[in-house]
């Protein structure tokens, strides 16, 4: 039997991790149900891409503000209130679905409300992780947190597809609304240790200046922006892919679950390769290039089984980007602005997902989903190859200089 990761022996982090797992599973039920409903109501890949835009769109306006909140305010309170907002929006969707009045625009509006809560709360929630564990366990905690997200990515879609086919969308939305209660309960009782230096007096422009001038942070954020824009269509347009392969909601759940299963395997592999000396600055462009190859395989898949295999392959390298970038941003960020850098990281993830999925959906309306995915895959392969040929050593260095003069003690990575 595999040993329990040592960071899970810390009670506060263990409770937070389990509650996050439950909530993330609930979110995947929501994603499966709302995406499939939009496709069936409109028959348009662009409409499915637009759902990603309205759900992720709040990140354009609120991610950097959420990062400032995380550095200046009580992170636990931010988490509680933003999870409550998301729970209320999901509950409203369940009620309106039960009443039979859940049309396309209602789904868009309530998905936007969920996105507002997510965008405001994510930097604070990510910044809570270092406050739950000792500094020497941060890298393991971040990796395990990402692995938990992908356990949910594996289980949530499969459960969502089955629940949707068995009981309908109402139950998917209701379970998601209930799942937020677990995180609210854990955060209300959590005891957080101080970590780093709060940067309440540091303007956001200082964080933007660091991100612009520091080679490591700049490459991390730009690399994630490009990857999120061109890789996200395989997830956000999965209902369209499933429909092309002749699958229903259950097949959609299998496709997304396969991606999550591949991500679990990828997280395990990355942890071991990192322990053996693989640097994040190398892992990131390598994963971008190999992911692109897998995405091309998905575009060419003739049957559901081939699509499932391609999604699993892509999932393994998708998680490399998110684990390695998230960890590297936290380890490279000056201590006074970890929350702000995580807000910029969130912006680099969610904004491009929204625009990339909408653009790929519009392209799929014009030339078909296979050609749309193939075009995105070609861009990723080229970007990954360029990154391998142009490495940035600062990605694997210690914290960047702190503009407010806080000591930049080296954090383990």
Image (cartoon, helix red, strand yellow):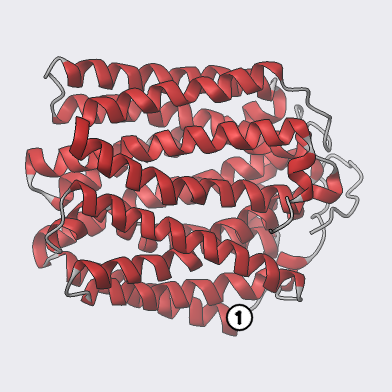
Q: Nearer the viewer, residue 293 or 312?
A: 312
Q: Nearer the viewer, residue 236 or 308?
A: 308
Instruction: Please tell me whether residue 107 is drawn above or below residue 317 in the rendered image.
Output: above
Task: Indicate the position of residue 159 as horizontal and vertical percent values.
Answer: 34, 42
* Residue positioned 45% across, 59% down in the render: 261
Residue 310 as seen in the image, left or right of residue 286 = left
* Residue positioned 16% across, 44% down in the render: 47
Give the residue pinned by disc 1: 390
Q: State the residue lying farthest toward the bottom.
A: 389
Secondary structure category for the residue under label 1: loop
Task: Count residues near mark 1 (Cα–Cα under 10 Å), then give few for <14, some for 14-19, many for 20+.
Answer: few
* Quarter of the figure that contains the C terminus: bottom right
User: Total label count?
Assistant: 1
The quadrant in which residue 93 appears is: top left
Instruction: Please tell me whether residue 34 is drawn above or below residue 46 in the rendered image.
Output: above
* Residue positioned 74% across, 55% down in the render: 3
Task: Indicate the position of residue 389 as horizontal and vertical percent values.
Answer: 58, 85
Viewer can see residue 65: no
* Residue positioned 10% across, 49% down in the render: 44
Task: Indicate the position of residue 219 as horizontal and vertical percent values.
Answer: 60, 64
Residue 328 as seen in the image, left or right of residue 39 = right
Q: Nearer the viewer, residue 331 or 64?
A: 331
Instruction: Please tell me whether residue 173 is drawn above or below residue 397 in the rendered image.
Output: above
Q: Nearer the viewer, residue 171 or 242?
A: 171
Viewer can see residue 130: yes
Residue 372 as seen in the image, left or right of residue 156 = left
The quadrant in which residue 258 appears is: bottom left
Task: Indicate the position of residue 387 as horizontal and vertical percent values.
Answer: 55, 77
Q: State the residue lying farthest toward the front.
A: 1
């Amino acid at each position: 039997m595999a040993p329990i990761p040592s960071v899970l022996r810390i009670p506060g982090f263990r409770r937070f991790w389990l509650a996050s797992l439950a909530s993330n599973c609930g979110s995947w039920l929501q994603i499966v149900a709302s995406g499939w409903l939009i496709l069936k109501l409109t028959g348009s890949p662009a409409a499915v891409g637009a759902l990603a835009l309205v759900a992720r769109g709040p990140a354009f306006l609120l991610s950097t503000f959420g990062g400032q909140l995380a550095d200046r305010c009580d992170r636990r309170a931010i988490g509680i209130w933003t999870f409550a907002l998301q729970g209320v929006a999901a509950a409203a969707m369940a009620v309106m679905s039960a009443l039979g009045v859940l049309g396309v625009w209602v789904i868009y509006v309530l998905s936007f409300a969920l996105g507002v809560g997510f965008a405001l709360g994510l930097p604070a929630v990510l910044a809570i992780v270092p406050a739950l564990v000792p500094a020497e366990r941060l890298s393991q905690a971040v990796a395990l947190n990402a692995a938990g997200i992908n356990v949910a990515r594996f289980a949530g879609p499969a459960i969502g597809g089955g629940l949707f086919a068995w009981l309908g969308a109402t139950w998917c939305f209701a379970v998601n609304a209930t799942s937020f209660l677990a995180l609210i309960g854990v955060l209300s009782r959590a005891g957080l240790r101080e970590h780093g230096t709060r940067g309440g007096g540091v303007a956001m422009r200082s964080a933007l200046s660091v991100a612009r001038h520091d080679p490591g942070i700049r490459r991390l954020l730009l690399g994630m922006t490009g990857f999120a824009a061109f890789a996200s269509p395989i997830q956000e347009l999965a209902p369209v892919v499933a429909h092309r392969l002749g699958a229903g909601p259950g097949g959609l759940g299998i496709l997304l679950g396969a991606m999550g299963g591949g991500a679990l395997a990828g997280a395990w592999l990355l942890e071991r390769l990192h322990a053996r000396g693989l640097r994040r600055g190398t892992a990131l462009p390598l994963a971008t290039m190999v992911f692109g190859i897998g995405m091309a395989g998905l575009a060419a898949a003739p049957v559901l089984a081939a699509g499932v295999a391609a999604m699993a392959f892509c999932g393994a390298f998708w998680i490399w980007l998110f684990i390695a970038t998230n960890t590297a941003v936290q380890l490279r960020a000056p201590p006074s602005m970890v929350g702000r850098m995580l807000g910029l990281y969130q912006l680099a993830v969610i904004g491009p997902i929204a625009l990339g999925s909408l653009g790929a959906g519009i392209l799929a309306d014009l030339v078909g989903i296979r050609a749309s995915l193939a075009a995105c895959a070609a861009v990723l392969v080229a970007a990954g190859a360029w990154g391998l040929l142009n490495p940035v050593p600062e990605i694997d260095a210690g914290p960047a200089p702190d503009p407010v003069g806080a000591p930049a003690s080296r954090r383990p990575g």
